[in-house]
Image (cartoon, grey):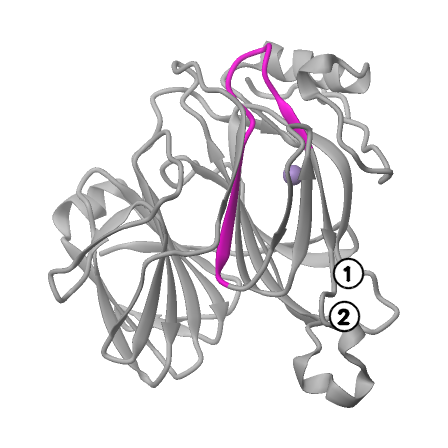
Amino acid sequence: MTISTLEPRLTDVGGVPIARLLPNKGKQPIGAWCFLDHAGPVEFAPDDSGVQVGRHPHTNLQTFSWMIEGEILHKDSLGSEQVITKHQVNVMTAGTGLTQGISHTEQSVFLHDDVGAADSSTATRNMNMVQLWIALPTDQQIERSFNHYPELPTWTEDNVELILTTGNYTAASGEHYQAPTLQYSKMVGIDVHFLEDGDVTLDLEASFEYGVLVIIGELESEGKVYQKNQLLRFHRTDVANSTSIRLVAKKGTRLMFIGGEPLNNKVLLWWNFVADNKEALKQSINDWNNGHERFGEIDSDMNRLVAPELPEGFKG
Ligand code: MN
């Protein structure tokens, strides 16, 4: 199978260094997964406030947060207020169309800071998180929502721990797993953690596109080695001819396996907005910067981010 390797772009979000893998040099989304940021692993100093992302909007997408370690408080314009912690998923759905949208804030909370310096073993100032966006099918009328998933299907195959963060999957044992996570197009997301040196074989759906992010450690596949913050992308024609992929890694390596069916509509990204046409992006920029009610209000005194204008020549 041919694999292309996407390299990270290093940036900063809310005061924390980020490796951005999607979007990536004109490459299409992987299924509906259209944006991928990996933050960490990082240990915040005692005087570091960690992630502080002020009020900002989203359109025509779901934010999908996969927390491997650490704690973040999410607040949104639906009135949701939720701390996400280790091995949990948050999904915020912005809704589709020009009358919908949502806004939120994200900030680190250090729940164990009050335990005291004497018990530093329980202090959680570490963070390791992947945040993705899932483009919504714009031919569906989708309403805003926020969902928190504290429990996800987890199983082990030959010393590899798998957590199904979204979608459904049949394990090597034949056991079928279904994640509770809200979806509007067919997709899957699996956290893959090597508890020992070894390998795992993951089944592929013929209609899906796939990618694998190296979160910690290094991965071997088809005789090549991939490093932390590289994203392997499998092309659809290749997937159609292969029913599985074998991944080999050393103890401690952690991967995120994502896949999905591509959407029928265009997926354009600008700032925090997704749309299927350029005019809708312009409208969203204008609406947010003018305080339009479609984005609601958040019970937060964090700063309000300003949407940059679309550049001349933005391809629609
Ligand atoms: Mn956001």
Q: Is residue 189 left or right of residue 244?
A: right
Residue at the (15%, 60%) spot, across then down: 175
Outermost residue toward the bottom in this view: 118
Q: Residue at x 40, y 35 (%)?
A: 32
- Dividing the picture into quadrants, the one containing residue 85 is bottom right
Q: Quadrant of the N terminus?
A: bottom left
Q: Quadrant of ligand 1?
A: top right
Q: Quadrant of residue 304?
A: top right
Q: Could you tell me which residue is drawn at 34 percent across and 31 percent down?
A: 185
Name the residue that disc number 2 marks.
44
Q: Is residue 24 visible?
A: no
Horizontally, residue 140 falls left or right of residue 108, namely left
Name which of mark 1 and mark 2 comes first in the sequence: 2
Q: Residues within 10 Å of mark 2 (few under 14, many from 20)?
A: some
Dot label at residue 3: none
Residue range highlighted in magenta:
87-103
Q: Position of residue 162 (x, y in %)?
A: 33, 66
The answer to which quarter of the image holds residue 109 is: bottom right
Residue type at tag 1: Gly
Q: Tell me whether circle 1 and circle 2 mark residues in contact (CB < 8 Å).
A: yes
Of residue 223 and residue 137, the one placed in the foreground of this image is 137
Residue bearing mark 1: 50
